[in-house]
Image (spheres, rainbow, N blue to C red):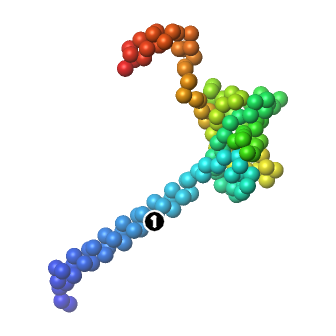
Amino acid sequence: MAAIKAKHQRLVLLVVALVVVLSAGILAAWALKSQASYFYVPSDIVAVPPVATRTVRLGGMVEKGSLKTAPDGVTIHFVVGDGKARVAVEFAGIVPSLFVEGSGVVAEGRMRPDGVFNADNLLAKHDENYVPREMQQMTKDQAKKVVAETQ
């Protein structure tokens, strides 16, 4: 059998490397697709509900007067709205300290067949005027001094 010329060896090596890189890219894309969590606002979920098996994120404002705690003391029910639509949400677990009515929230979970969003995780959002509890009673000068000391 004749030896492969150096020119052909480089070509074979290039083809093998290209196949390996493409295979790795396809495998990575497939793995990320199964881990992706899509973001919806209430009007999107009402218009086209996601598949019940797909984990999605629902973002919006917690409507005032909608927050109710179930008798078990762990489960909460509330409504998330975006000004165009409303979605009922149920969550069982520890609620973030910033989670209050009228604030922004991102709930991660699945839509149930009855139209209620079953959240597995809640992320409370704060506005640009957020101040930690420890600093709420401080004057602006005291707060600046504390911030300067921690940097």
Disc 1 crowd, CA 10 A, few/some/many (<14, 14-19, 20+) = few
Q: Is residue 141 visible?
A: yes
Q: Secondary structure at mark 1?
A: helix
Of residues 52 and 139, the one nearer the viewer is: 139
Q: Is residue 17 left or right of residue 35?
A: left
Quadrant including the C terminus:
top left
Give x and y (percent) for residue 78: 76, 35
Q: Residue at x 58, y 29 (%)?
A: 127
Q: Residue at x 64, y 34 (%)?
A: 104
Give the farthest residue toward the bottom: 1
Of residues 127 and 92, the one nearer the viewer is: 127
Give the farthest residue toward the front: 83
Q: Is residue 10 left or right of residue 15?
A: left
Of residues 60 and 150, the one nearer the viewer is: 60
Say if 87 sits above or below 52 in the image. Answer: above
Give x and y (percent) for residue 89: 74, 41
Q: Residue at x 26, y 74 (%)?
A: 13
Quadrant including the N terminus:
bottom left
Q: What residue sits right under mark 1 in the picture?
A: 26
Of residues 3 and 68, the one nearer the viewer is: 68
Say if 143 sits above or below 59 in the image. Answer: above
Q: Residue at x 22, y 76 (%)?
A: 10
Give x and y (percent) for residue 9: 21, 78
- Say which amino acid is labelled 1: Ile
Image-quadrant location for residue 62? top right
Q: Is residue 121 visible?
A: no
Count the numbered circles shown. 1
Give x and y (percent) for residue 99: 66, 29
Say if 14 sits above or below 145 in the image. Answer: below
